[in-house]
C-alpha cells in the first residue's frame, strides 16, 4: 500500500488526521472556532462547537487548545459517552490527577471544585475543561454538569468549559433541565464543509506537507473529492488518499475524477 508514496515521491503519508497544530491549514472556520474558544476561556464561560461527523471539530479543538499559553492554562480534555455523570466526573478527576476512590457524586463535585480553585489561586494556572463528543451525553448529565462550575461565596468563573459535538447537541441544550448550563454559553461555532476553492487549497496543503509542491489532483479530481465528501475533512482525506493509490496503480502522475470514483467504491 506504500507504492503510491514511492510513485509520487511522498516524504510521508498525506491526508492524515493527527496533524500537529502548526501543520493545520488555517481556514476561516478554524480561526473562527479559535476566536470564540479564546473568548469563552477568557471570560470563564461555556463555548459550543458543533458540526457533522468528520467536519473537523476535534482538529479545531486541538488547534485552539494549542494556542493557549501553557504557563497560564491547563486543558482538561475528556471524551464524552452515554454514561452517567459519575463516569464523566471520573474522567475529569483522572485528568486532574486527583486520587479519589468513591462513587459519591457530592464528594466528586467537591473535590473537582477544590482542585480547580487550588490551581487557579495557588498555581496561577487556569484549567479549561474540553468535552468532546458532548452530544453523546445524557440529558440528566446536562442538568447537573453546571454544578462543577459553581463556587460557593465566589462569583468568579473559575472553570471555562468547551462543549463539542454533533448538531443534536444544541437540541439537548434546549431542554428545560439543561437550562442552567445553556444559560452560561457565551460563544458558539458551527463547522460546515469546505467550499470547492478551499478544498483545492486543502488538497495542495496536504501534498505540501508530504513534500510535493506540484498539485497532483486535476480539477476534475478536486471537484469529485469535494462532491463525494460534501466538503467534510475526514471523507476528503479518505478519498484523496484512495485516489492517490488508484492513480499510482495505473501509473498516472495526475489524479483524475476516475481515480476518486475508484477510491469511493473502496471506502463507501
Image (cartoon, grey):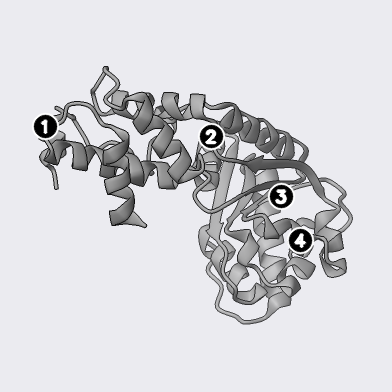
Q: Mark 1 — residue?
A: 7
First of labels 3, 4 by sequence position: 3
Q: Mark 2 — residue?
A: 194
Task: Say the numbered circle drawn on residue 183.
Answer: none
Q: Residues within 10 Å of mark 1 (few under 14, many from 20)?
A: some
First of labels 4, 2 by sequence position: 4
Q: Residues within 10 Å of mark 2 (few under 14, many from 20)?
A: many
Do residues under tags 2 and 3 come within 8 Å of each other at their CB atoms?
no
Circle nearer the viewer, 3 or 4: 4
Q: Quadrant of the C terminus?
A: bottom left
Residue at mark 1 to residue at mark 3: CA–CA distance: 51 Å
Task: Say the numbered circle drawn on residue 159.
Answer: 3
**Residue at screen point 83% across, 45% down:** 156
First of labels 2, 3 by sequence position: 3
Q: Residues within 10 Å of mark 4 (few under 14, many from 20)?
A: few
- The answer to whether residue 174 shows anywhere in this view is yes
**SS class, disc 2:** loop
Is residue 139 depicted above or below 198 in this figure?
below
Identify which residue, 192 or 17, lies in the foreground: 192
Is residue 154 depicted above or below 5 in this figure?
below
Residue at mark 2 to residue at mark 1: CA–CA distance: 28 Å
Circle nearer the viewer, 1 or 4: 1
Q: Position of residue 99 (x, y in %)?
A: 53, 68
Horizontal side of 260 relative to 108 (left or right) equals: left
Residue at mark 1 to residue at mark 4: CA–CA distance: 48 Å
First of labels 2, 1 by sequence position: 1
Q: Residues within 10 Å of mark 3 (few under 14, many from 20)?
A: many
Circle nearer the viewer, 1 or 3: 1
Amino acid at each position: 500500500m506504500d507504492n503510491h508514496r514511492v510513485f509520487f515521491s511522498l516524504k510521508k503519508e498525506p491526508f492524515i488526521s493527527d496533524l500537529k497544530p502548526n501543520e493545520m491549514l488555517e481556514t476561516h472556520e478554524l480561526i473562527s472556532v479559535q476566536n470564540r474558544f479564546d473568548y469563552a476561556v477568557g471570560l470563564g464561560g461555556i463555548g459550543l462547537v458543533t458540526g457533522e461527523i468528520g467536519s473537523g471539530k476535534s482538529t479545531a479543538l486541538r488547534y485552539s487548545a494549542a494556542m493557549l499559553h501553557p504557563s497560564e492554562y491547563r486543558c482538561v480534555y475528556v471524551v464524552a459517552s452515554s454514561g452517567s455523570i459519575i463516569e464523566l466526573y471520573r474522567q475529569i478527576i483522572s485528568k486532574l490527577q486527583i486520587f479519589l476512590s468513591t462513587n459519591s457524586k457530592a464528594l466528586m463535585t467537591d473535590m473537582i471544585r477544590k482542585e480547580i480553585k487550588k490551581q487557579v489561586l495557588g498555581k496561577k494556572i487556569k484549567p479549561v475543561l474540553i468535552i468532546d463528543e458532548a452530544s453523546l451525553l445524557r440529558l440528566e448529565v446536562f442538568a447537573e454538569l453546571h454544578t462543577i462550575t459553581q463556587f460557593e461565596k465566589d462569583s468568579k468563573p473559575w472553570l471555562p468549559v468547551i462543549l463539542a459535538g454533533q448538531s443534536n447537541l444544541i437540541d439537548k441544550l434546549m431542554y428545560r433541565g439543561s437550562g442552567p448550563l445553556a444559560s452560561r454559553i457565551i460563544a458558539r461555532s458551527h463547522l460546515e464543509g469546505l467550499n470547492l476553492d478551499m478544498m483545492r487549497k486543502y488538497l495542495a496543503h496536504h501534498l505540501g506537507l508530504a513534500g510535493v509542491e506540484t498539485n497532483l489532483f486535476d480539477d476534475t479530481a478536486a471537484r469529485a473529492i469535494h462532491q463525494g465528501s460534501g466538503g467534510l475533512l475526514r471523507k476528503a482525506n479518505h478519498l484523496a488518499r484512495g485516489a492517490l493509490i488508484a492513480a499510482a496503480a495505473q501509473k498516472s502522475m495526475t489524479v483524475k475524477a476516475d481515480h476518486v470514483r475508484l477510491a469511493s467504491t473502496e471506502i463507501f
